[in-house]
Amino acid sequence: MNGVEAVAEILKREGTEFLAAFPSQPLIDAAARLDIRPIVCRQERIGAAIADGISRTTNGKRLGVFSMQQGPGSENSLPGAIQAFGDNVPVLLLPGGSATDRLNVDPNFFAVPHYERVTKWAAQINRIERVPELMRRAFYHLRTGKGGPVLVELPTDVGSAAYPGELEYRPVTSNRTAPDAHDVGEVAAALLGAKDLVIHAGQGVMYAEATDELEQLAELLQAPVMTTMAGKSGFPENHPLSLGASAVSTTKPISVFLNQADVVFGIGCSFTKSGYAKAIPSGKVIIHSTNDAMDVHKDYAADLALIGDAKLTLQALIAEIEARTNGAGNRNDDQTAASVQAVKKEWLGEWMPQLTSNETPLNQYRIIWNLMHLVDRANTIITHDAGSPRDQLTPFWESVAPRSYMGWGKSTQLGYGLGITMGAKLAEPDKLCINIMGDAAIGMVGMDLETAVRNSIGILTIVFNNGAMAIERDTMPMAIEKYGSVYQGGDYRAVAKALGGWAVRVEKPEEIIPALTQAIEITKTGAPALVECIVKEGFDFSRYP
């Protein structure tokens, strides 16, 4: 076998089912010969997003892989790597590369030096004999520690060279770390001593498959739980102690309980300060538990820290707290859940006029509310796009099962949600997979609806079409006044149909549920469906101090 065939064989042994790709890349055909299904996209950023969606949906157990051609393919794929890096998603990137004798000869593009800043690890296979060694290291990095994209570049001369002898390679297993026992004792004491504790959970809870342990700890301490946008669905939001999730927008329960908290316990999170995360008010005792020591003291000073896998950490804390309290914890305090539910009821009451609005153009919150009560949420995977759809969906969509919501956005690339939804559907074909995007987002990536058509990926895309980049309105008043620069438009129903998909336009409130019901039935046939909703220009968000 040659170098390309050796890489394909390793992918097969590692359990790869799909190869998201963009030609020309000889790995596509080599993988197909081994029954790894190629998903050829229309543009590289969406190919990277498809791989990303596979990894998110499977907790990285079935890793997403994206392969792109040398030169322009590697250049165009950089945004996909940046998004996966920002969201800590384990994705394997396999670019082709110019021959090794072209190294440092301009304008030949070599991926490694350009991707090193936005990958967890990047390497070039510079000799055919190193294929198994470097692929083994790649998969170990993908499966161990904090997630992130990993890149292995295969130059053309190495890819075509004959591999000497038999390929000796066996699948790589991961390792987990557990926190120091002394540190666990200190944190357990602080948690038990807190007057108003809030648990701040990130996506590390999901990658560690620690939702059950998080529920157990919350109930043991009678502590309310909020999640980050990326961690949304890591704690069931129909649980009495759930405060919901936060992005730019937030829930009133998060605001109320976070403001009054004296101790904030972050588990499986990076505590990153950004415009897409709820800020932690000053004056709190902060306990930070993460599997990456580089996150500690990054943006917030930590009073106490635990380094380790979220599941192992939670198990250790539960055992320590039970030992210190004879198993009772704070269970004798039954007021917290009632207080959380009272604030939640008050908040939903404030928003019910929008959630049930009969106005036209349609209110985006009415569409979200109807959709949430129409689907089986435990068997649905939903995501948003960047901008308004993210901040309208995140607070109000009640997630009830792990990985039923894909929250993303530390880098907010318009259109990324379409690709990760396709990846989710490939990984979980029996689930309803939904992407809600705005008209600006579909303008970026709409041609890749044809990728879903061609590959029989039955996703549901909901487009909020208000004919404007409404969220940007305040940033360019003169450009709008003189030139109407914020306005854009299109018949996206017609676009979807022209690309071979099923599509419908909704303009009246009473049309929402029938259109969504019909679209969901279409997706069950393996065909993608698009519901274009003509919505109002306003972008009110659930914001609380």
Image: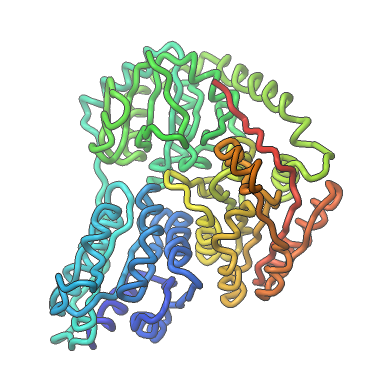
Identify the image's colour scheme: rainbow, by chain, secondary structure or one colour. rainbow
Q: Residue at x 40, y 48 (%)?
A: 87
Residue 260 appears in the rendering:
yes
Q: Is residue 414 above or below residue 154?
A: above
Residue 372 point in image, percent of width and height? 69, 45
Q: Is residue 254 above or below residue 383?
A: above
Q: Quadrant of residue 56?
A: bottom left
Question: 510 and 184: which one is in front?
Answer: 510
Q: Quadrant of the N terminus?
A: bottom left
Residue 497 point in image, percent of width and height? 71, 71
Residue 391 appears in the rendering:
no
Q: Residue at x 65, y 71 (%)?
A: 526
Q: Residue at x 38, y 29 (%)?
A: 266
Q: Quadrant of residue 132?
A: bottom left
Q: Residue at x 38, y 83 (%)?
A: 34
Residue 238 lies left or right of residue 155; in this view the side is right
Number of marks present in the image shown = 0
Residue 82 lies left or right of residue 452; in this view the side is left
Residue 109 point in image, percent of width and height? 25, 70
Q: Is residue 144 above or below residue 477?
A: below
Question: 315 and 298: which one is in front?
Answer: 298
Q: Quadrant of the C terminus?
A: top right
Q: Is residue 26 above or below residue 242?
A: below
Residue 446 point in image, percent of width and height? 59, 64
Name, please, the residue furthest toward the front: 482
Residue 325 lies left or right of residue 122; in this view the side is right
